[in-house]
Amino acid sequence: MSRVHDMGGRFGDGAIDPNPGEPVFKEDWHGRALAVTLACGALGQWNIDVSRHARECLSPKDYARFSYYEKWLAGLADLLEATGVVTREELAGGPVASSDLTDRKMLAEKVAGVLAAGGPANRDGRAPRFAIGDRVRTRVRSANAFVAGGHTRLPSYATGVTGEVVLRHGAHVLPDAAAHGLGERPEPLYTVVFDAGDLWGAPERAGDEVTCDLWESYLEAAS
């Protein structure tokens, strides 16, 4: 079964405005939420895939009612406690103990450089199985192959569908493994284009296409 976050292509959620004209941070605390998340990530206790999975694991009721940055903070709080960085009592406002992670704190003057550098996930790995132009089909289920209910970057709307490889990106960290402490297990990564009608059944316009970045283990050769 999919988690509540896997809602791509779902009817009933209203229109999406691609040009809302809003500031980057609608509320002052939104920027602070991003800053706290970056600062905690710099402690080195988890990777980006672990943090994504933490947000996905929020209860459906919370996920549905929380705003974007509330989801970030809720997932972060769970991670901080799960990794022992802070205790539940400290999160609730109790006395804060000293930490051996203090030296890893991100200083304000380093933020711009850290953001500019990003977090590259490309790695050395095996040669790609598929070539540009190959027809491929995604696996029938989007479930994580290692952990039941685990993190994956294959959305449910793109399962069991045939598309065409349009780009090859070399080998990249496999999120399905990295999110669960199973190592990086780099695999070839591709951009695959699909006909929107094959994904949605009722596309807005005939001929529309959707591209997805997909790891090799998500794919098989289309007959």
Image (tube, rainbow, N blue to C red):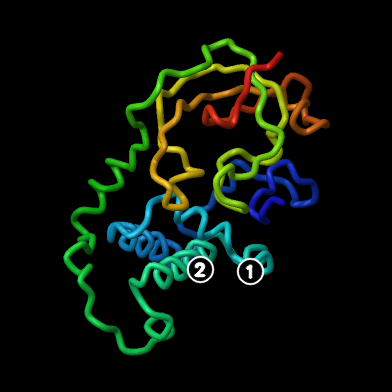
Crowd tier of the residue under label 1, counting other residues whose Cα lies within 10 Å: few below 14, some 14–19, many 20 or above: few
Residue sitting nearer the eye, 19 or 95: 95
Is 86 located above or below residue 135 in the figure? below
For the C terminus, the quadrant is top right
Q: To which quarter of the image does residue 30 belong? A: bottom left
Give the residue drawn at x 49%, y 53%: 52
Give the residue drawn at x 67%, y 23%: 137
Is 180 located above or below residue 122 in the figure? below
Disc 1 residue type?
Asp
Give the residue drawn at x 51%, y 44%: 176
- Helix, strand or loop status at disc 2: helix
Q: Is residue 76 left or right of residue 130?
A: left
Q: Earlier in the sequence, mark 1 or mark 2?
A: 1
Measuring from the top left, give residue 11's x and y in whole percent: 79, 46
| Image marks 1 and 2: residues in contact by CB distance under 8 Å | yes
Disc 2 residue type?
Ala
Residue sitting nearer the eye, 84 or 92: 84
Measuring from the top left, give residue 130's x and y in whole percent: 53, 15
- Helix, strand or loop status at disc 1: helix
Measuring from the top left, give residue 215's x and y in whole percent: 52, 31
- Residue 62 got which mark? 1
Query: Between marks 1 and 2, how big is the CA–CA gap?
Result: 9 Å
Q: To which quarter of the image does residue 203 belong? A: top right
Measuring from the top left, give residue 47's x and y in whole percent: 38, 52
Crowd tier of the residue under label 2, counting other residues whose Cα lies within 10 Å: few below 14, some 14–19, many 20 or above: some
Q: Is residue 118 left or right of residue 89?
A: left
- Residue 74 got which mark? 2
